[in-house]
Amino acid sequence: MTFGGDNASGMRRRIAILGVTGLLAANALLLVVEPGIALPRSLATYFFGPKLIRADVVLRDGGSREFRLDQGRLRRQDDSSLLLREADGTVVAVPVAPNAAVRLNGRAATLADLKRGMVILTIREGGAAASEVRARSQ
């Protein structure tokens, strides 16, 4: 037997989950575009820091825009792509745009500067090649 209170509680929980999901999606774009107006650093670090494996973010911005973030250890690279092994074991090939911004430990770099085993975060819009590559040595 179901009582009215149980349904209302479930509905409130679903609304709360949807609200948090929307907030996190909006913050992902803010972290990429304008870090200064994103959520407080501790929450941003929790969701988009070292624990991140991958994220798909869809935003309404004069239409629908989708961003894909992949983070993993570099297995292999060439002039136009990176092969990453993500923390859950997924291996993903990420194409990289010729004009992509590459940063290694916060400094400008090139794809040739990246070494096997480094932790790499790639940012791409939709199915396009990555426009940004952030790497850190471990």
Image: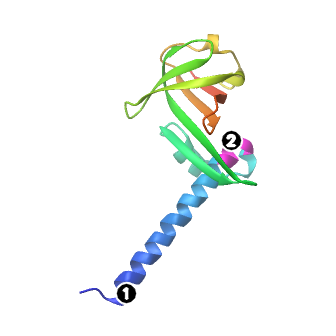
Residue at the image point whose x is 37% and y is 30% from the top: 89
Regarding residue 128, the answer to whether it shows in the image is yes
Which quadrant is the N terminus positioned in?
bottom left
From the viewer's perspective, tell me whether residue 20 is left or right of residue 63. Answer: left
Tag 2 near tag 1, CB within 8 Å: no
Q: Residues within 10 Å of mark 1 (few under 14, many from 20)?
A: few
Question: SS of the residue at dot 1?
Answer: helix
Residue at the image point whose x is 64% and y is 28% from the top: 129
Q: Is residue 50 above or below residue 65?
A: above
Task: Indicate the position of residue 2 as horizontal and vertical percent values.
Answer: 28, 86
Asked if residue 43 lies in the magenta stretch, the reply is no
Q: Nearer the viewer, residue 95 or 51?
A: 95
Residue of label 2:
32
Cα separation, mark 2 vs mark 1, equals 41 Å
* Numbered circle sitting on residue 5: 1
The amino acid type found where label 2 is placed reads Val
Numbered range of the magenta stretch = 29-34
Task: Indicate the position of residue 124 as horizontal and vertical percent values.
Answer: 63, 35
Question: SS of the residue at dot 2?
Answer: helix
The amino acid type found where label 1 is placed reads Gly
